[in-house]
Amino acid sequence: MARVVSERLITHQLIPSVYANFWGATSVSDIVEILGRAYAASSVTQRTKRFFGDLLRSVGFQVDFGGTAVTVSYEAKDRAEQERVALMRLLEVPQRMATRSATQQRLLMILDEFGEVFNVPGEPDALMRAAFQDSMNVSFIFMGSKRSLMDALFTDQHRAFYNFGRRVELGRLSYEELGDFIESRFEASGKRIMPEAANLLLSFADGHPHRSQQLAYHTFRIASEEADEEAVLSAKEAALDETASEFQVLLDRMTPVTRAVYLAVCTEPTAEMTSRPYLERQGIKSTGSLRSAIRTLTDAGDLEQPKGGIPVPTDPLLAAWVRERMNEV
């Protein structure tokens, strides 16, 4: 989604963008490195490359102009205050980039997995808010897959980003639009996916953006000229293979109660979850434990619960792995 937005902005409105992914950030040093790499990756002209080269060197990056791109590396400073100074300087960059633009004097800053910032010591979000609110020529998109962390950053009155922007819930992708898109991408690359195969892929992905992309990639890779249902089934197995370790770690990190509830939702979804036979069958002690675990899993983004509906797994591939593969581990 971020890539599509960026491409449309630069194509139709000549507005450049910077994309930074904060996944795995645990320190101010990590944030400094992520931003530095994001700025370097956005360098498209020689003049911009030199601007970033000078800037990044001044805050401690090693900069290499070899090839067509600017390559950077960064080593953490010995003192926390030095890291904060480096971060503050980098946070001023979006506004400077926007005003240097020869066209619209606008910039879009896309901050993916921004919820990771919540757990970084030193409250870097306070520094970010102070810089961003003065960046009058910059628009910001904050994205995150962990709802609880995003809520903590933007809805807690004691956090710096409280009410900073408008919240937008992204639902699952439309089957019709996603199916049309997948078919068009196959055709544009010289292959074809049969309608029945596309429908099967859509059923497996269940509108999940990343899993749709993952399954479509493996289907395209496996198929020769025409992707049929067998290719999609093989793609599903390939996706399950490559995510098995990730899924096992995710389940291992759950408490016994939340794990039991998650497995129950995956293997035996029902509107009668609070019935005593169901709780006993799934090894859940009480309705209180059930509700608490559902709330925990929903906050973590592992479950979704529509109003008046039963909870469902957010990740359809993980749910499939639980049903089909977990007992093999």
Image (cartoon, rainbow, N blue to C red):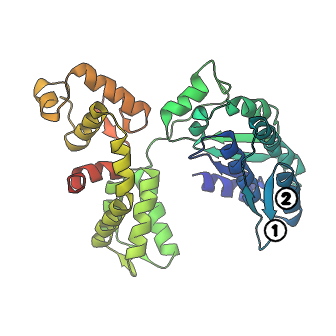
Q: Return the x and y of residue 190 as percentages of the image width and height.
A: 49, 79
Q: In this view, does 176 lie to the left or right of 44?
A: left
Identity of the residue drawn at 35% across and 71% down: 194
- On residue 65, the disc is 1
> Considering depth in this image, is 252 or 55 the residue closer to the camera?
252
Q: Do the residues labelled 1 and 2 touch (CB within 8 Å)?
A: yes
Extreme residue in the front direction: 78
Extreme residue in the left direction: 277
Q: In this view, does 290 lie above or below 326?
A: above
Which residue is under mark 2?
53
Q: Is residue 264 left or right of residue 97?
A: left
Q: Return the x and y of residue 79 as percentages of the image width and height.
A: 76, 38
Dot 1 amino acid type: Phe
First along the sequence among labels 1 and 2: 2
> Considering depth in this image, is 321 or 213 the residue closer to the camera?
321
Q: In this view, does 17 lie to the left or right of 213?
A: right
Dot 2 amino acid type: Gly
Q: In which quarter of the image is residue 225?
A: bottom left
Q: In which quarter of the image is residue 230?
A: bottom left
What's the distance in space between the residues labelled 1 and 2, CA to CA?
8 Å
Residue 42 visible to the viewer:
no
